[in-house]
Image (tube, rainbow, N blue to C red):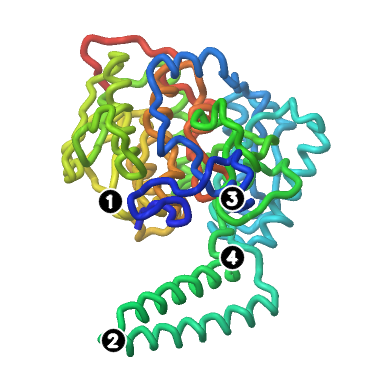
Amino acid sequence: MLSANPSIMNSNGECHCEHPKGAKQSHSQRRDCFVSLAMTFLITWSAFILILYSSCLALTPEEVVVIANKMAEDSVDLAEYYMKKRGVPAHNLIKLKAPSDEHCNREDYEKYIASPIREFLKKNDPGGNRFKCLLIMYGVPLKVGAPKLTNHEQKQLQELRKQLDITHEKIKKSENQDKMKIETLKKEEEGIKKQIDDISKAFEGASVDSELAIVREDNYPLKGWLPNKYFVGYRREKVKNMPEKVMLISRLDGPSEDIVRRIIEDSLQTEEKGLYGNAYFDARWPDPGDKKVTDYAFYDRAIHNAAHLVEKRLLMPTILDSQERLFQPKSAPDAALYCGWYSLANYVDAFTWVRGSVGFHIASSECSTLKNKGSKVWCKAMLEKGVAATLGPVSEPYIQSFPVPDVFFGCLVEGQMTLAECYALSNPFWSWQMLLIGDPLYQPFKNYKKKKNSQV
């Protein structure tokens, strides 16, 4: 279930932690505080222009490092295929000997993934000025788990679980007794649960991609997320504990080797001919206008804003639905752009996707797998159906960690930034659950020419 982080939001969905620069904040509060985006930041059209022309990262093929896995069939072949198509230098390839499962433990991640990449970057780009982006290929794990528990931590966990069972039984026995006593026991229960989360390292797992974005950082806390310095919501903010050695990140992956090749080809052809079709934006509530909104309502309004931005640019027919019901099966033909929510791990077959289409669905764990045949998570299904680029979380991300729709699509439709740059500007956090799938150099509106009637 997609939710707002309870450590950040109060019962009204408002931020209850202090501003990051506040001296009274603890280290974890500063790291977990969702600075200003979900509470106050509303991107405007003029702000987009400012971002585009003053902060363009100008990613080139020479700045992309491609990461393949020799232990996974087709991974190296796909990497070399992509590099040849895009003109990425051959010496920009890293060949890992890593696990090929979608999930890996923290120890394997450090030994077989992070360490070889770190060594390559130190050797070939010690100053950090040569390479800007890491591209992860098919066959590299999606998700990395939390560090292994020590024997002492395992014993602590056993004891806390016993305490939790005892407290739970006390609550059951007190159901028809003093309300004050029940409330005290419930607070005690919540405290024990929090201790269990901390000791079990429940919030120390992440997507491999999100960890690798800060692979140049020597040390950083694993619990929760870390702020992304490229994110527009942090501009002009003094945010503590923000990693500075950050790389752009993307992944070319999917249910099969053929789908990855198709993504590469579709991206190149779309850049040449332009992206034409319809833009579909699926909000759940009417546009609140300038009314102050938070968490879920903020993202819903961001979907409205994204639709207005695309429509204002006169790029293509734009369909905005603000009813709670999602687009129904077969109701969205020739989809070129899409953003909507909320159908958990249950893709709705509403769309026919045009070549080069880009879109994402806001829901929990929609990129938890790309390979499980029975899964209907949105990232996997959208790739199978024909999109060229999408994004999603490998585990519960909390609503405020999704890339902000109006920022992402606003940057994309300007046509001057690459996919990886659009993602970096719209993504609030690293060392967390999100990942981007697509050619990092993809610019679907690079050579776009307006047509009177957009046709596929």
Q: Looking at numbered disc 1 in the image, what kind of residue is underneath it?
A: Ser
Mark nearest the camera among 3 and 4 is 4
Of callouts 1 and 4, the N-terminal one: 4
Of callouts 3 and 2, the N-terminal one: 2
Mark nearest the camera among 1 and 4 is 4
Residue 355 in which image quadrant? top left
Along the line of sight, the residue nearer the viewer: 390 or 365: 365
Distance in Å between CA atoms under marks 3 and 2: 49 Å
Q: Residues within 10 Å of mark 3 (few under 14, many from 20)?
A: many
Q: Position of 167 compared to 381: left or right?
A: right
Identify the residue at image location x=31%, y=34%.
292
Mark nearest the camera among 2 and 4 is 2
Distance in Å between CA atoms under marks 1 and 3: 25 Å
Q: Which mark is residue 177?
A: 2
Q: How crowded is mark 1: few (under 14 residues within 10 Å), some or many (20 or more)?
A: some
State the SS at label 2: loop
Identify the residue at image location x=67%, y=26%.
63
- Which residue was labeled with disc 3? 208
Can residue 209 be seen here?
Answer: no
Of callouts 3 and 4, the N-terminal one: 4
Residue 305's spot in the image, x, y percent?
31, 27
- Which residue was labeled with disc 4? 201
State the SS at label 4: loop
Distance in Å between CA atoms under marks 2 and 4: 36 Å
